[in-house]
Amino acid sequence: MFVDKAKIYVKGGDGGDGLVAFRRELYVPEGGPAGGDGGNGGDVVFRVDEGLRTLMDFRYQKHFKAPRGEKGRNKSQHGANAEDLIVRVPPGTVVYDDDTGEMLADLTRHGQEVVIAKGGRGGRGNTRFKSPANTAPAIAENGEEGQERWVRLELKVMADVGLVGFPSVGKSTLLSVVSAAQPKIGAYPFTTLTPNLGMVQVDDERSFVMADLPGLIEGAHTGVGLGHEFLRHVERTRIIIHVVDMSGMEGRDPFDDWVKINEELKLYNAKLADRPQIVAANKMDMPESEANLTVFREKVEAVRPGIEIMPISSLTRQGIGELLYKVADMLDALPDPAETVDETANEEEESVVYRMEERPSDHDFRITRDNEVYVVESESIEKLLKRTQFASYEAVMRFGRILRNIGVDAELRKRGAKDGDTIRIGDFEFEFFEGGSDEYLFEDR
């Protein structure tokens, strides 16, 4: 089964917690802090594997979570960083953030990698908080949470040549004749529902990949007849072979068919109008085909001079060899496929976590009221809260001191906050206190 869309959940590993510990050697009095930092959580990394052709694996596994870092250790030892979680995807996979619709990566080359969800940084151990004013700190940080998101995967098949045209014009038959592929062939429209790939070997030992794409109909660029599902795959091809039924057996005019399909390609993606194209005038073994071809050439030459029109018959193999040689020559003349991935654009920005010495801007937070509760909204403060180990009195004091330094308590007073009022930050609620010595505390409720 061919699967070309999937939606999955990814989460980077959480960072390991920092440790509060002290040196306890027999002959080292007042040895000082010895708690190590936690290890970093693992990243979720997508890696292209050319051995994969579909997104089938993601139908059965939809959650991918990287391991968390180890906790800090005694003797100032750093906890081990977690290994990255490698998720294999087929070439041609485009990754979108499901919430924002932003394209995160366009993966085309074997071995190409991109970090989709970064792991959290490990928390600092109490060794990091030693200072002349506090030589034995009992403070450590929790590890940072890993990034998490739902992503949408879309697969655009990677092929040198794409076969396009109305249903039942002979695309699948042509692919079955020139390659070892065995697509489903039937005398009814939309026999092909998913792309089929075949390796074509030319007699002079040149080769290329050909894709039989499901038939298009008028209005495909708006999604009619699953148009978007089919047109997506044309974007990757370097050359388009436009298969046209010259027999006119089904009452359709070959020239009108050619015009309508080209219009659908152009409306879906304007760049496809400039893609090199060969018209494969198929079913030339039928009685009316020669006369239709003459009229077809005249009309096409009037609107698009110089386009290659090659008469073939997939049934009798008439003109097949000439077509393959022409395609191989055109591919040789084209430049190497341009890299479609901007390496720098896919690098995730490192999450910001304010250290004790850093000072966020004065506008880094916002205070609102929810009935009697004061709500402090700030991404950076919520991250600081999650990293704070509230079981430690010193850590609580440090948390309150940082908030006072960035002006949160002053703003709360301005809004009318008094002793005992409830303050909410993220999922936590605290009780507000003001000390006479300008001491400022949040007491965990």
Image (tube, rainbow, N blue to C red):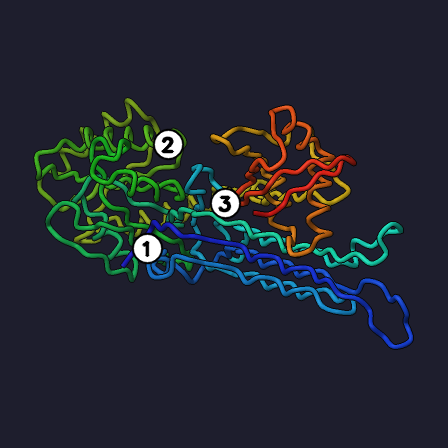
Residue occupying the point 79% across, 65% down: 34
Residue at horizontal 69 percent and vertical 44 percent from the top: 399
Q: Is residue 23 above or below residue 195?
A: below
* Mark earlier in primary sequence (1, 3): 3
Residue 263 as seen in the image, left or right of residue 358: left
Q: Amino acid at mark 2?
A: Asn
Q: Nearer the viewer, residue 285 or 58?
A: 58
Q: Which is nearer the eye, 13 or 424?
A: 424
Q: Tag 2's secondary structure?
A: loop
**Which residue in the structure is indicated by mark 3?**
105
* Residue that appears at 75% across and 65% down: 21
Residue at point 40% right, 53% down?
208
In three-dimensional space, the C-alpha distance between marks 1 and 3, rounded to whole angstroms, equals 24 Å
Q: Position of residue 285 (x, y in %)?
A: 14, 46
Q: Is residue 30 visible?
A: yes
Q: Which mark is residue 197?
A: 1
| Viewer-nearest of discs 3 and 2 | 3
From the viewer's perspective, is 84 left or right of 283?
right
Residue 350 visible in the current orientation? no
**Mark 2 or mark 1, which has the lower sequence index?**
1
> At which x and y percent is residue 415?
60, 25
Instruction: Residue 383 in the image: state x and y as whole percent.
Output: 61, 45
Asked whether, in this view, residue 315 is left or right of residue 379, the answer is: left
> In the image, residue 146 lies at what x, y percent?
56, 52
Graded by Cα atoms within 10 Å as few (under 14), some (14 to 19) or many (20 or more), the crowding at tag 1 reads: many
Q: Nearer the viewer, mark 2 or mark 1?
A: 2
For marks 3 and 2 on the same chain, the one whose residue lies earlier in the sequence: 3
Residue indicated by mark 2? 269
> Label 2 crowding class (10 Å Cα cut-off): few <14, some 14-19, many 20+?
some
Looking at the image, do the residues carrying marks 3 and 2 touch, with CB atoms under 8 Å apart? no
Secondary structure, mark 1, is: strand
